[in-house]
Image (cartoon, rainbow, N blue to C red):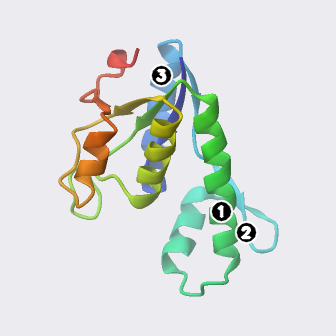
């Protein structure tokens, strides 16, 4: 199966680990990019970019150009895939966190009739109803349930 992994960039190390395990099970897997260009065109890690983005206060910064590019590229990966796996680990004191960008990715996958898998249970969050309406399969960290 072709699978695109989605989730907070804060979980990038976990994404790499899950990708390796999914490939071992015979799947083809795509992730968000490992690096992005900074304002001078130099490549920086997504973790460094994420830290800069979280600290940015200027609405017209180069940061948002890269965010737009990253979102569009990841949407293309979702189009390519048969399924999307949401890595919803704990973050910001929220169990099984699903952030706004990940919710957008889930919505696109839902619209495109892709299979939706959640690594952990649906979070108790203000948009829980929207997640429930997309009817993702919760796999409780068991990657063999992805079929």
Q: Secondary structure at mark 3?
A: helix
Which residue is farthest bottom? Answer: 58
Q: Which residue is mark 3?
A: 22
Give the spatial CA distance, label 2 vs label 1. Answer: 13 Å
Q: Secondary structure at mark 1?
A: helix
Q: Can you say which quadrant of the picture contains the C terminus?
A: top left
Q: Quadrant of residue 117?
A: top left
Give the spatial CA distance, label 3 vs label 1. Answer: 28 Å
Residue drawn at point x = 44 percent, y = 44 percent: 106
Looking at the rendered image, the disc whose residue lies closer to the viewer, 3 or 1, is 1
Query: Where is 56 relative to 53, above or below?
Result: below
Q: Quadrant of residue 115?
A: top left
Left-right relation of 85 to 63: left
Residue drawn at point x = 44 percent, y = 31 percent: 18
Residue in front for this viewpoint, 106 or 89: 106
Q: Quadrant of residue 36?
A: bottom right
Looking at the rendered image, the disc whose residue lies closer to the viewer, 2 or 1, is 1
Of labels 3 and 1, earlier in sequence is: 3
Of labels 2 and 1, earlier in sequence is: 2
Instruction: Report crowding for label 1: few under 14, some 14 to 19, many 20 or more residues within 10 A (C-alpha).
Output: few
Q: Which residue is mark 1?
A: 68
Can residue 33 be spotted in the picture? no
Q: How many marks?
A: 3
The answer to whether the residue labelled 2 contacts the one labelled 1, judged by CB atoms less than 8 Å apart, is no
Instruction: Report crowding for label 2: few under 14, some 14 to 19, many 20 or more residues within 10 A (C-alpha).
Output: some
Q: Which residue is mark 2?
A: 38
Instruction: Report crowding for label 3: few under 14, some 14 to 19, many 20 or more residues within 10 A (C-alpha).
Output: some
User: Residue 100: x and y, percent?
Assistant: 41, 60
Q: Secondary structure at mark 2?
A: loop
């Amino acid at each position: 199966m072709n699978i695109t992994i989605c989730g907070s960039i804060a979980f990038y190390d976990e994404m790499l680990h899950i990708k390796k395990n999914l490939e071992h099970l015979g799947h083809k897997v795509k992730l968000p990019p490992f690096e992005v260009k900074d304002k001078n065109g130099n490549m920086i890690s997504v973790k460094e970019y994420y830290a800069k983005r979280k600290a940015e206060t200027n609405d017209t910064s180069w940061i948002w150009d890269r965010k737009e590019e990253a979102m569009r590229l990841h949407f293309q990966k979702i189009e390519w895939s048969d399924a999307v796996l949401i890595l919803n680990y704990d973050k910001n004191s929220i169990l099984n966190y699903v952030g706004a960008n990940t919710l957008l990715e889930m919505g696109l996958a839902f619209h495109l009739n892709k299979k939706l898998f959640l690594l952990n249970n649906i979070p108790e969050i203000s948009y829980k109803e929207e997640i429930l309406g997309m009817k993702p399969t919760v796999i409780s960290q068991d990657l063999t349930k992805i079929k």
